[in-house]
Image (tube, helix red, strand yellow):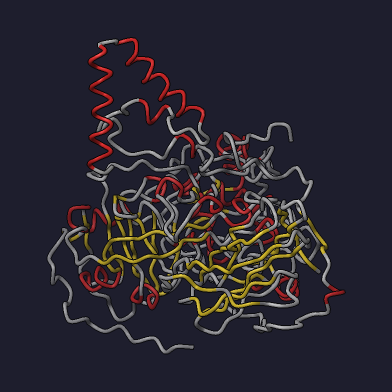
Amino acid sequence: MLLWPTITAHAAGPGYFGYGKLATPAEIAGWNIDVRGQDGVGLPDGKGTVDHGADVFAQQCATCHGTFGEGEGRYPKLMGGEGTLTGERPEPSVGSYWPYAPTLFDYIDRAMPFISPHTLSADDVYAVVAYILNFNNIVPNDFVADRNSLPKVKMPNRDNFTWQDPRPDTAAKECMKDCTDPKTVKIISSAEGTDLTPRTTGPLDAMTGN
Amino acid sequence: MSGRMRHGWQKSRRSFLRIGSAAAGAVVLARRAAIAGESSPPAESDWTRAVGPGVVDRTYGQPSKFEKDVIRRNVPWLTATSQSSVSFTPLQSLDGIITPNGLFFERYHAGRADVDPRQHRLLIHGLVERPLVLTMDDIVRFPSVSRIHFIECPANGGMEWRGAQLNSLQFTHGMLSCAEWTGVKLSTLLDEVGLKKEAKWVLVEGADAARMNRSLPIEKCLDDCLVVYGQNGEALRPEQGYPLRLLVPGWQGNVNVKWLRRIKVGDAPWFTREETSKYTELMPDGKARGFTWVNEAKSVITFPCPEKPLSAPGRYEVRGLAWSGRGKIKAVDVSFDGGVNWQSAQLQEPILSKALTRFTIPWQWGGQPALLESRVVDETGYVQPTIAQLRKVRGTNPIYHNNSIQTWQVKPDGKVFDVQLG
């Protein structure tokens, strides 16, 4: 692993160019919407109950995510999948996969509802988060989400992540001659004849026949 | 024409005119046209008979109408909505290493943002001495650099983890494009604001409706990251983040945040939704890998491919592309028999770090069935693995980082199919 240089002042130094304007605290406060997943730093004032979350969810979320997060049509499911991660068809959901609960606040606040994002109040976001955690059986019915309680929620899959990249994890060799027995070379899978490939000539293929 | 011939022709021309028969002249001209039409290929065509449109008939140039098949395309069944989705570059129809701006692949989490550059701002704050708000006019004043780099979505080839599914180069490899990016080094901007000594991580955030955000380690930010406004000589396209985006050379597409509006310096990662719920890889033991940023070395033969079959037995130039998020390409080898024997392909200039590199190899095809593969070695010595080798370590559910060797089956009729070997 390369040794990274410590942060050094380059020859120029802060303010050398003098472009732009210093950001005021008010400006920063307005932009500063992020919440850290691991420790909840950045969570705003406010709180929300599971019950209120159910109401908000029904109005704002259920059309895509289903009343209980079961998914609607092709839109994502937010619950279920416990015990499937080592199986043939894993179902990663909030409950079965997400490592950190405060990330729910960060994401829902900035990016949801999908068609009108960043329109929920902080209280309503807390409530929706509480509801989602509840239908994933992670918090009880009387749970109240706020900046203190959310970081304390331990997600079931939290310890199943590694954050250090272990790659390269293959040791292929640059063999040039007689690398395998030709008799063992066989096609085990082919895309010939599948009807999954959109056409690559003509107009865009809506594939409505499939 | 020699002077004597010209003189002779003019003598007979004058004699025609002296006859004074317009009809005779017309017969001559009609005969000339007829003779031209009969020759094969025609010496006279619509475009040689009539003067074309003048300059600025089209103020922003377009490809020939005969190139209308060369477009970005999508896989409708892949996503619930095209607004959180991806499109694919038609690699099979491109030459060189530069992807034209109109064919650069798209990936949105909340549709394409159409940003007014006069209103757009970049805020840099957090563990810094001087938090700054910059306009686009401010940003272009900083010292500018220009670099050629690929951007690849790590889900490129993701549909092939379980088996060969898409009979196409465009759809198996098209979440990949390469351009010349012009902008200011992120290290220059971080220098301008002054980093506090606790600074270890950076949050980058876009101005799209998803306000998409990712964490990056400060070392990469200070290394080769760019904040860019130029794409192949003109302003970024809206599809690629106009007016400003982050360029993180060699790292997964998602961290190259488009419509860049905020850079926040901190002391720990944020563990955003995109780097926890998504862009993490589930391994067979149920554990998941996160922060797997770099796109490892990869290559693919672009001719022949399913979209570009062979016509008849004969001498061909097999062509392809190789790229590595860790640096330059060192070598590409090509096999015609499914990986039993390999030959060295020729790398074509320019060979640039974290950019597409062309390779070619001549092939005398006798009409026999063949299994074509390319295998890249990058400057770190890393060798591109087979799909079997990758699956052995990662199973079939990681979704991302399928950089395996691609096998094209060539049949005696010249048709080409996406296959996988056991």
Residue A88, located in which quarter of the rendered image? bottom right
Q: Which of B331 and A6 is in front in this view?
A: B331
When the figure is inspected, residue A179 is found, relative to residue A188, above or below; the finding is: below
Residue A90 visible, this angle: no
Q: Nearer the viewer, residue A136 or B321?
A: B321
Identity of the residue furthest to the right in this view? A183
Residue A139, located in which quarter of the rendered image? bottom right
Q: Which residue does the image show at 42% across and 89% down from the upper left? A: A3
Q: Which residue does the image show at 71% across and 69% down from the upper left? A: B336
Seen in the image, is B40 located left or right of residue A87? left
Q: Position of residue B214 (x, y in %)?
A: 45, 62
Residue B343, located in which quarter of the rendered image? bottom right
Q: Position of residue B242 (x, y in %)?
A: 34, 48
When the figure is inspected, residue B12 is found, relative to residue B304, above or below; the finding is: above
Q: Which residue does the image show at 51% across and 43% down from the upper left? A: B70
Seen in the image, is B376 located left or right of residue B159? left
Quadrant containing the C terminus of chain B is bottom right
Q: Which residue does the image show at 58% across and 35% down from the upper left? A: A202
